[in-house]
Amino acid sequence: MSSIKQLAGQTAVYGLSSIIGRLLNYLLVPFYTRIFTAGEYGVVSELFAWVSFLAVLYTYGMETSFFHFANKTSEPKKVYNTGLTSLLISSVVLSGIAIVFSGSIAEALQYSRHPEYITWFALIIFFDTLTTLPFARLRRENKALRFAAIRLVNIFINIFFNVFFLVLCPLWIKDKGVFHSLAETVYSPSTGVGYVFISNLLASAITLLMLAPQFKGFRLQADKKLLLEMLQYGFPLLIAGMAGMVNETMDRAVYKFLAPDASKAMHELGIYAACYKLSIIMTLFIQTFRYAAEPFFFSHYGKNGSKEVYARVMNYFIIACSFIFVVVMLFMDIFKLFIGENFRSGLSVVPILLMANLCLGVFYNLSVWYKLTGQTRYGAFFSVAGALITIALLFLLVPKMGYKGAAWATLICYAAMMLMSYFTGRKNFPIPYEVGKMFFYPVMALLIYFSMEGAMLLLKPEGGIKYLMAGLLTGMFLLMVLMMEKENKQHLQK
């Protein structure tokens, strides 16, 4: 029981810190979309999309390999040294190549006037890669609070430097006050969005310094046999990770190369990336759910009635996601304040992306079958299949539809992964899902949304009347849920 309590406590710490961290990072979106133009924010979104791919490439599954082999041996220190030595050498080589050829890489990405961007990101990924195993070591040593504290401090440092460079320094230069000389020394208006990258670089470097105790006793050491085994174990994770990044961020990484009008591409990308963030509530709910659900699923595996429990969890998950869709879309006048006014022309993609996230959440729920049965190869297969679908649809839809095509590609990809997992799982690990309800609640949410849109066109309500209508339609959805779940009232209350 004590070990279970410890696990529950650590899960809460890791989960809460992750959610808070993501929420704090999201708070930079209203900040950026009120400081930068859409084109400038497009630069930020595109480059960080490429970084997500490089982060997977640089770490090549070594974190999970470390956990796997450290628990199989009586010499976990050797595993740590071998893994960290490998990451150090490979990241030095990769970042070194990126810095040496920064001009050519910048030209290929159409940033020939800013090769410094490539250098900064090469250093950011280098520092972040070196923190991978120290953070993993903290987790293995059950130092959840220290892990969470350093993660959150990293985010606060990033936010501080963003505010310092983008708000305080320009003010101090104008005011010519006490801090005028400091601002003139460290700030140049021509750097612009580059200060977003510099802030990340400083946060990454300071985080590595905070992890210095985890390097105590480390020495360059690579057991060849062990390293080969770790690389073989991590390679499938690299493939799955890259496929996952294709599904998550490829649309922003390649948008300007596929956009119907190249002259407007970065402007459109900035709008799309900002509106993408309006699915924050759905994303945060799914993230929170995953932290709670995975231990829950494993703890119930093999018990009497466990499959019925999994089916009930799926049902309530879809209810929650459908409710989030209804609230966000019916009260969009409030939620759109999250992004700057110049970015709101792309709000039409929000319902598409919310439904895409709902499908992704259902896919995570369905993944219980291959995780519980140890058939994790299916997870990699679904991710790779989704990646191929995403790539094909981006090349097909974006040149014709712009960023709406990117949104539809995301929805179709996640819907396809969801269906593949459902039909494959039905053969391998059948769970009695209430398929009728699984479709009913999202369809009902869409009908309510379209009803509101129709009322807006015909009646053109304003002010309090508009919010009253939205409230009534939201209440109608909840009433429908209560009627449908009448038999499960006690379970629903729990």
Image: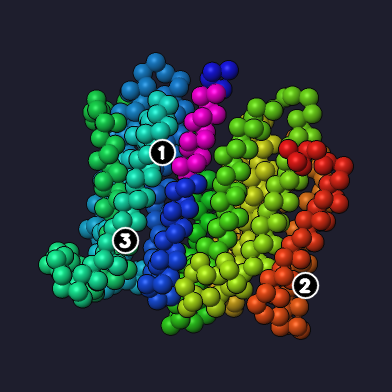
> Could you tell me the amino acid type at mark 1?
Ala
Residues in magenta, as a range: 5-18
Residue drawn 83% across the image and 47% down it: 485
Residue under label 1, please give it: 148
Residue 394 colored in magenta in the image: no
**266 versus 1 height, above or below:** below
Dot 3 corresponds to which residue?
Answer: 162
Q: Could you say whether the residue bearing mark 2 is in a helix, strand or loop?
A: helix
| Residue on which the image places disc 2 | 451
**Which image quarter: residue 186?**
bottom left
Could you say which quadrant of the image residue 365 lies in? top right
Residue 231 visible in image: no
Callout 3 secondary element: helix
Crowding near the residue tagged with mark 2, few <14, some 14–19, many ≥20 C-alpha atoms within 10 Å? some
Q: Which residue is more in the foreground, 374 or 35? A: 35
| Contact flag, marks 2 and 1 (Cβ < 8 Å) | no
Q: Reply yes or no: does residue 10 show up in magenta.
A: yes
Question: If you read the primary sequence from the N terminus, does the residue marked by circle 2 or circle 1 appear first?
Answer: 1
Lateral position of residue 310 relative to residue 226, left or right: right
Mark 3 Cα-neighbour bin, 10 Å: few <14, some 14–19, many ≥20: many
Q: Quadrant of the N terminus?
A: top right
Residue at mark 2 to residue at mark 1: CA–CA distance:
44 Å
Front-most of 138 and 222?
138
Indicate which disc, 2 or 3, sits on the residue closer to the N terminus. 3
Check disc 1 and report its element: helix, strand or loop. helix
Residue 333 falls left or right of residue 303? left
Gap between marks 3 and 1, in whole Å? 21 Å
Q: In this image, 365 relative to 432: left or right?
A: left
Q: Residue type at mark 3?
A: Asn
Which quadrant is the C terminus positioned in? top right
Looking at the image, residue 422 lies above or below residue 2? below
